[in-house]
Amino acid sequence: MSAYTSAVRHGGAWLPAIGLAALGSTAVTLAVPDVLGSAVDAAAAGHGVGRQLLLAGALMTFGVLCDMTNGYASAACVAGTTAWLRLRMTRRVLDAGPANTGGFTAGDLLGRVCGNAADAGRAGPGAVSAVTGIAPPVGSLVLLAVIDPWLAVAFLAGTVGVILVLRSFTRGTTRALRTYLEIQGRIVGRLVESLGGIRTIAAAGTAAAERDRILAELPELHAAGRATWRFLARSTFQGSVLGPATLAAVLAVGGLELAKGRITPGELFAASRYASIGTGLGGLTAVFAAVARSRTGASRAAELLELTEVEYGDRAVPEGTGELTFLGVSCGMLRDVDLTVPGGAAVAVVGPSGSGKSVLATLAARLRDPDEGEVLLDGVRLPEIAHDGLRAAVGCAFERPTLVGTTVADAIGPHLSRSRVEDSAKAARADAFVRLLPEGYDTPLADAPMSGGEAQRIGLARAWPAHRLLVLDDATSSLDTATEALISEALLGGARGRTRLIVTHRAATAARADLVVWLDEGRVRRVGGHDWLWQDAAYREVFAA
């Protein structure tokens, strides 16, 4: 089932309400000309018109109520469907993980979840409006046939042209809108990237160049936007020709029929109104434009909903010391890696840039799966372990941690007791500076500006509670030497009993480790103690780079 169809179906009980209200409003629109036509005939015959005018007033009041019901039901349906889509899209992005969402920039994801979901959320009311939009021309055709068959023939000739105009408009608008939204997503993506590095841009004096980079596709966006307006303008022009032409044809035929005494003046008045109602392109183009935008938004939302989720097994974390095994692993820069990380050991991973260190860490934490081969924790494949158990057993800290949550305590452990949060912060040497914040651990993150080193220590504290494996991807690079030494001491002493995989560029950190894994060009070049490896000049060059 397509995302568009799913969005339509999610409207549920609101859709019949919208449809009935729309049909009620259409019925009023079609009934009023007949009533007023009867009033014209009554006035021409010298009879009273009070009854007809009262009926027309009652019908109009009912029509207003139908429009109000339609408006409320449509708004409620759109809001509910949009919220449902955003929740599904957000969950799918988070469940897909960084490996499967790597093809989307942050800005593009934001644009799809916020903007495109809202477009797709209008699918239900839009589809109902498109269906009920057929009622006015069909009803007009039937009522014209009732008045006089020749009026229906004259009307039908113009209606065929209206259908062709709407078909062309819908196809062209859909193509142009998709191009527009795709380009818009890329521009927003580049803007979000730039905002993340705005201090660097300002310091480098490259704001003008960055502006040009962000807006490089603005001419294409402009062209796509103009294309949508061209389609609208063309259909409006065609409608401005078809509508009056059809009305003129109906009036001409009606005039002849009136002269022959086959219809009354009131019926001619009603026929003119039905011709105008049936060929009115203004409302129909708006409806079909909305449908085109909904379909485009749904197709972009579908690309997120179709992301592959990371699947987890149902096995508990096995008993063991935290032994980590890579069997024939290839992924990214890594090629055919066979490696065993001893349980409970502190293992440094070193190598030049591009050697695959971060990929190895990512695989160890199961932030992505290898293209080939397997990664095992204490003899069990990582995909077989249940999500909650694996995430409790494996902790990760990164070079540039993103701190999430409401307060500093939340950033360390939203589900941990305060005592465990503080213990983790002390182990990561973060407790001292956190207590200097205005509200300590309860300080809102927005009110707790941190240096790169302080943010890294919070990231380390967040990873610290993991009970089996700690994966640190250059997570102490922004720390001063003294603090890094204290944290290394904590990792080597306080974290005993857990395996520690530490990606580092510092010789001092490698020297403190129990074992060093030396990666080069995606392969394990050597494994051994730092002092032994230091005898190799190529190994020493890794730290000199």
Image (cartoon, rainbow, N blue to C red):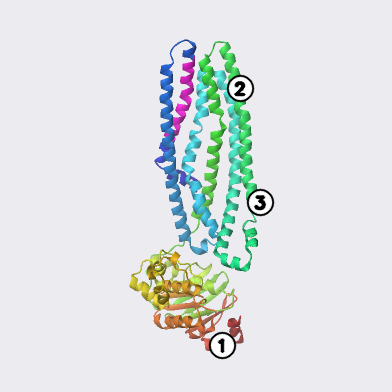
Q: Earlier in the sequence, mark 3 or mark 2?
A: 3
- Residue 424 lies left or right of residue 128; in this view the side is left
Task: Provide the major secondary structure of the magenta segment.
Answer: helix
Residue 161 coordinates in the image, percent (x, y): 61, 30
Q: In this view, does 125 lie above or below 425?
A: above
Q: Mark 2 points at which residue?
A: 248
Q: Which of the two residues, 309 or 130, is positioned nearer the viewer here?
A: 130
Q: Earlier in the sequence, mark 3 or mark 1?
A: 3
Q: Which of the two residues, 493 or 324, is positioned nearer the viewer here?
A: 493
Residue 27 coordinates in the image, percent (x, y): 45, 27
The span picked out in magenta is 19-40
Q: Is mark 3 on a helix, strand or loop?
A: helix
- Image quadrant assignment for residue 489: bottom left
Three-letter code, disc 1: Trp
Q: Is residue 415 above or below residue 475?
A: above
Three-letter code, disc 3: Pro
- Residue 321 lies left or right of residue 197; in this view the side is left
Picture residue at 43% right of the left edge, 30% below the top: 63
Q: Dot 1, how many residues are within 10 Å of its Cα: few (below 14), some (14-19), or many (20+)? A: some
Q: Name the residue under label 1.
A: 534
Q: Dot 3, how many residues are within 10 Å of its Cα: few (below 14), some (14-19), or many (20+)? A: few
Q: Which of marks 2 and 1 is in front?
A: 2
How many numbered discs, if any?
A: 3
